[in-house]
Image (cartoon, rainbow, N blue to C red):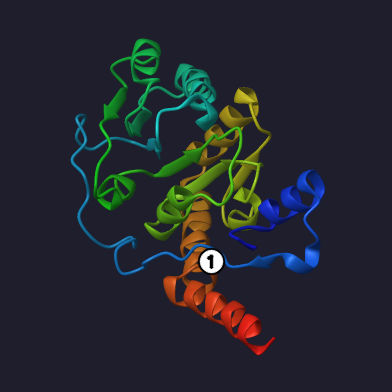
Amino acid sequence: IVVNSRAVARQLAEQDGVPASMLRLAYNGLDTRLFRPEGERAELPWGETAAVIGTVCALRPEKGLSILMEAFRKVKAVRPGVKLVIVGSGPMLAELEAAGDADCHFQPAERNVAPWLRAMDIFVLPSLSEALSNALMEAMGCGCCPVASDTGGNPELVKDGETGLLFPVGDAEALAERLALLLDGPAYRRRLAARAERRIEEHFTREQAALAMGEIYQEFLRR
């Protein structure tokens, strides 16, 4: 059984009783020719602005978007001028739009998300559950500073305080604190973003994913 994160391997072993000897890890791989900081940037409705927080995901309850909206309101109350961009489509759109205001932009799901990611300073993945998030990898590859809930494979991508920040699942107050820290420290934010991009380049490319799968096939064929 091939899994794309150690978190999924633990879940299969602990909840489903799958023997560890049957599990093999092959992380998802990113096409870093497409997802990189250089390239086209989406045009935001506000023009140039101080800082942009954003996310890209399906608008479903398990993505924790209500947590992001609550945290954004808390941050904006003391740091006016910050903006929020949510790219995606799904059943929560009407609810999210009702909770938003003029500082929030909702963009329907895009085939090419890289330009939107490049327009974000901080990428937030507030999911209540995850395996290994392609969206988080894509944001890191595009040079966003990542903030993610500490669930599933998120901590395998984001090393807290090194390649981004983590916060407890469902904790809007903690998320707001981390967003405020990054908004108040642009140099720190850029440093985390650069390390996040480097982590993708070093560990999560398509070539590395192909090598990992190749090794799994070779092991199987040698039996």
Task: Name the spot of residue 110 as percent of width and height, x first.
Answer: 25, 42
Q: Nearer the viewer, residue 194 or 10?
A: 10
Q: Can the viewer see residue 160 in this picture?
A: no
Residue at image position (41%, 51%) is 139
Task: Name the spot of residue 186 as percent of width and height, x first.
Answer: 46, 46
Q: Quadrant of residue 35?
A: bottom left
Answer with left or right where residue 161 lies relative to residue 27. right
* Residue at the spot of label 1: 199
Task: Name the spot of residue 206 as percent of width and height, x first.
Answer: 43, 71
Answer with left or right where residue 207 lies relative to residue 222. left
Q: Quadrant of residue 82?
A: top left
Q: Secondary structure at mark 1?
A: helix
The amino acid at mark 1 is Arg
Question: Neighbour class for label 1 at 10 Å: few (<14), some, many (≥20)?
Answer: many
In which quadrant will I find the N terminus? bottom right
Answer with left or right where residue 119 lies relative to residue 92. left
Residue at image position (45%, 24%) is 79
Q: Vertically, is 152 above or below 103? A: below
Furthest-top residue in view?
Answer: 98
Q: Vertically, is 59 above or below 74? A: below
In which quadrant will I find the C terminus? bottom right
